[in-house]
Image (cartoon, grey):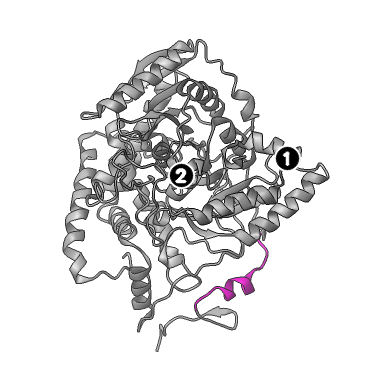
Amino acid sequence: MKMHTLSVAELSKSLKSKEFSSVELTQHYLDRINRSDLNAFITVTDELALSQARVADAKLANGSGSVLTGIPFAHKDIFCTKGFKTSAGSKILDPFISPYDATLSHKLNTENMVMLGKTNMDEFAMGSANVTSYFGPVKNAWRSSRQKDLVPGGSSGGSAAAVSAGLALGSIGSDTGGSIRQPASFCGIVGMKPTYGRCSRWGMVAFASSLDQAGPMTKSVRDAAIMLQNMASFDPKDSTSVKSVIPNFELALTSNIKGLRVGIPKEYRLDGLSEEIKQLWQRGVDWLTQAEAIPVEISLPHTKYALPTYYIVAPAEASSNLARYDGVRYGLRETGQSLDEMYENTRGAGFGEEVRRRIMIGTYVLSAGYYDAYYVKAMKLRTLILKDFQEAFKSVDILLTPTAPSAAFAPGKKMDDPIQMYMNDVFTVPASLAGLPAMSIPSGLSDEGLPLGLHLIAKPFDEEMLFRFGGVMEEAADFNGSPPCFGI
Amino acid sequence: LAKLSINDSEIEQSTIELNNILSLMAELGEIETDHVEPMAHPLEMSQRLREDVVSEANLSEEFQEIAPKTGKHHFLVPTVIE
């Protein structure tokens, strides 16, 4: 039997009924990782995984396990994991062995989940194609009809590629401007960004602290609900963590969306949006209409300013967050005659091109003469973007948009121009700026046979609405496509 | 300010790219925002304060172990004051 084709819920049952053990399941995944050439993992924690699986099996044997006990998962290499390298895809953290666990890693360990390894990612989560990693690019498991290699999206590209290729049952990822949702769309999996403050950021390497949020990347909507249940919590160690009621997310999968109103934002119909994305979007509207939801055209007038706003706010925060990598206390150090020279050499050698670019942009927009013109202006636009959403949610329950303006593309094609790359995030960034929960659901195949995602955006802390609609869309889309290597 | 060393060969290309990005940002100038408050928090919340008590264990030995250069209870850097 192909164990990796089952869902979290199914595997949990099989483990409890002793059809197979967690050790067997874990070994199955480790073998698949070893055979794969996608470069999806930076570190494979095989010994840890097998020892965690043995502990899980003992728990399952005495009946004390939870739904996640013994389930093999991957962690994006942005989550600190005690005793293992946590690189965030950067040379500057290549030597860094974390002395502690992130709150999320700790929580999953407490459930006796099995950690298979740390997945590859764009350096410091800055990228949309997983090509900026110091540990090399990740390949998408899907290939175009012309059999070309494709990017998996980013920044959680290793996580998305691993889940789609059956190298892990799911992964925890992080999303700043679309880093969970866009790669999920490119790889044909479910990717969810919860409300800002829903999951702890403590021990998750910071990129842009007012936007960063962890979330699940899974094969199905139900698996995402099960995962979020075990990820969401109030964490006193994270000052932006929010004390909120945590509902039973799985119960939201009712298949009933009758009478609920779905906003279709007209500003997302970009000039030059491809015919296949327009058709996919219309198909999504039709599915929801068939399920007796009510589509309503709405307006989010400041949408076109979201991208430039994001590319001021995120680099500004990044330039501040990344100031800590100075070669003094941990990570890479290059020598220098003076302290300043040591800083400059360390950071010049340790950061890749895109990270340096964003640090320079961020430093520039925060500098004394330009602070008001760029940073304050962007924060004012952020207020207007938030107000657009608040206004829209007075008359609708959820929004439906495409996740990304295209399917996965070949490396090299769009990468020479940073602005072309930034366009990948055009549909995901507005919800990030407003702190809203959002989810990408695999919804069809492109003309070239590649996965495409549709994107749902809900009100703050209304992840239940995402799961409710997500379940309906998943059923209607009947997306059972998988990349060629999945069946092997 | 950013404390980054850059090769001379990279400067020209970087300048072009940074200028392109800044011109993308200049689009924001189209919008009149004199009476708009800059956002402080996406959910309009304020950050919690906590009691000023020690909440973390002392891990100084673990932190020293992973540092590039250390002395007894301190991190070593190039000479700052002669």
Q: Is residue A216 left or right of residue A484?
A: right
Q: Image point 52% across, 41% down: which residue?
A: A215
Q: Residue furthest right?
A: A62
- Cα distance between the residues tagged 1 and 2: 25 Å
Q: Image point 62% across, 71% down: which residue?
A: B62
Q: Tell if the residue under mark 1 belongs to the same chain as the one under mark 2.
A: yes
Q: Where does the image place residue A374, in percent across and percent down from the top left?
A: 27, 47
Chain containing the residue with disc 2: A
Kindly tell me whether residue A301 is visible in this rendering: no
Instruction: Name which quarter of the figure residue A394 lies in.
Output: top left
Q: Image point 35% across, 84% down: which residue?
A: A337
The residue to which callout 2 is attached is A485
The residue to which callout 1 is attached is A19
State the extent of the magenta-drawn residues as a range: B56-68
Location of residue B1 with respect to A75 vertically, above or below: below
Q: Image point 33% across, 36% down: which residue?
A: A407
Comparing A134 with A438, the one in front is A134
Label ID, residue B20: none
What kind of element bears circle 2? helix
What kind of element bears circle 1? loop
Comparing A378 with A431, the one in front is A431
Q: Is B66 one of the magenta-colored residues? A: yes
Q: Where does the image place residue B48, in percent across and percent down from the top left?
A: 58, 45
Q: Where does the image place residue A257, in percent across and percent down from the top left?
A: 52, 15
